[in-house]
Amino acid sequence: MADLSLEVVFTSSNESKLHRYQALAFPEVWFWQEGVFSLYHLRSHGYEKIDQSEILPDLDINLLSRCLLIASRVEAVK
């Protein structure tokens, strides 16, 4: 079973997709669109938007976003 789903959005974001992930019981879903992450965690009533991953609580999501936008791999690793 997967703990996390990451969807890279190239067209319009559609949070209604969350019901599909809920049917598959993904505890956490991340959407990456235009350099920004939107994170959702599954609760008893459905997905709730969160600011910090509960699956990876030590991950600095803002730092990850900035690194992903750096064109040079070497610079991103630094």
Image (cartoon, rainbow, N blue to C red):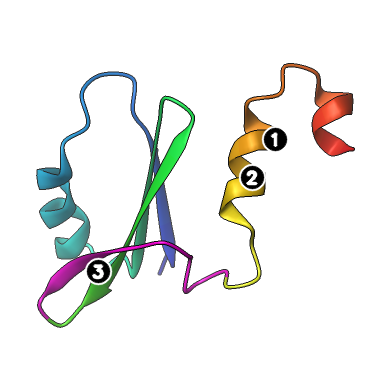
User: Does the magenta run of residues contain 54?
Assistant: yes
Tag 1: amino acid? Cys
25 to 74, vertically: above or below: below
Give the foreground label among 2 and 3: 2
Q: Which mark is residue 27?
A: none
Residue at 16 percent of width and 44 percent of height:
15
Residue 68 vs 37, above or below: the answer is above
Q: What residue is drawn where x is 45% and y is 36%?
A: 36
Query: Label 3 amino acid?
Result: Ala
| Label whose residue precedes the other's in the sequence (3 or 1) | 3
Circle 3 residue: 25
What is the C-alpha distance between the residues marked 2 and 3?
A: 25 Å
Q: Residues within 10 Å of mark 3 (few under 14, many from 20)?
A: some
Q: Which residues are magenta?
A: 45-56
Q: Quadrant of the C terminus?
A: top right
> The residue under label 2 is which amino acid type?
Leu
Image height of 64 relative to 13, above or below: below
CB atoms at circles 2 and 1 under 8 Å apart?
yes
Please name the residue shown 43% across and 60% down the image. 4
Name the element at disc 2: helix
Other residues around mark 1 within 10 Å, as few (<14) / some (14–19) / many (≥20): some
- Between disc 3 and disc 1, the foreground one is 1
Q: What whole-number distance in Å separates the C-alpha atoms at marks 2 and 1?
A: 5 Å
User: Which residue lies under the disc numbered 2?
Assistant: 64
- Which residue lies at the image location 80% right of the left edge and 18% below the top edge? 72
Indicate left or right for 15 with 49 as reference: left
Q: Where is residue 42 shown, x and y percent of the image?
A: 25, 71
Residue marked by disc 1: 67
The picture quadrant where one finds residue 32 is top left
